[in-house]
């Protein structure tokens, strides 16, 4: 796969999440805590939040929507994402940016 094909395949964060899901759970999503197979996929909406900086000024920032999984087994209800426990966990960059960067790193002549 060349760089142009990779850019087309992983053009949005949603396609990157779908790819990670297929690679991580080829037989279907399972709970990371209890191992159960009853898992719901939840798409959150984009929201806005008020943030106060060090000077006390309040500004509104956008919080992008994301995909979260929740275990449906009684007594578990664990929530997790596709990136939980991976190198992409707690990143503030969208996955499409990470995928593009890792593709460029892996195709360099000097490694």
Image (spheres, rainbow, N blue to C red):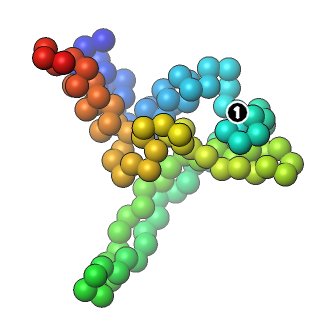
Q: Given the current orientation, which residue lies at the most extreme right position?
A: 74
* Residue that appears at 83% across and 44% down: 73
Question: How many dots with numbers?
Answer: 1
Percent position of residue 54, x then y: 28, 82
Quadrant holding the N terminus: top left
Which image quarter: residue 9?
Answer: top left
* Residue that appears at 27% across and 24% down: 103
Looking at the picture, tell me which residue is in the foreground, 85 or 28. 85
**For residue 51, above or below residue 18:** below
Q: Given the current orientation, which residue lies at the most extreme bottom position?
A: 56
Which image quarter: residue 105?
Answer: top left
* Residue that appears at 76% across and 51% down: 77
Q: Which residue is mark 1?
A: 30
**For residue 110, above or below residue 59:** above
Q: Secondary structure at mark 1?
A: loop
Quadrant holding the C terminus: top left
- The answer to whether residue 26 is left or right of residue 12 is right
Percent position of residue 23, x then y: 53, 22
- The answer to whether residue 16 is left or right of residue 59 is right
Evaluate whether residue 39 shows in this view. Answer: no
- The answer to whether residue 102 is left or right of residue 64 is left
Which image quarter: residue 15?
Answer: top left
Evaluate whether residue 27 shows in this view. Answer: yes
Percent position of residue 53, x then y: 30, 79
């Amino acid at each position: 796969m060349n760089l142009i094909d990779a850019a087309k395949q992983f053009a949005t964060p949603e396609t990157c999440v779908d790819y990670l899901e297929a690679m991580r759970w080829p037989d279907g999503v399972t709970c990371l805590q209890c191992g159960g197979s009853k898992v719901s996929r939840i798409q959150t909406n984009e929201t806005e939040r008020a943030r106060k900086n060090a000077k006390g000024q309040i500004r509104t920032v956008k919080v992008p929507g994301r995909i979260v999984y929740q275990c449906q087994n009684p007594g578990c209800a664990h929530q997790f994402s596709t990136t939980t426990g991976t190198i992409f966990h707690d990143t503030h960059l969208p996955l499409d940016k990470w995928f593009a960067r890792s593709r460029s790193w892996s195709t360099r002549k000097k490694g």
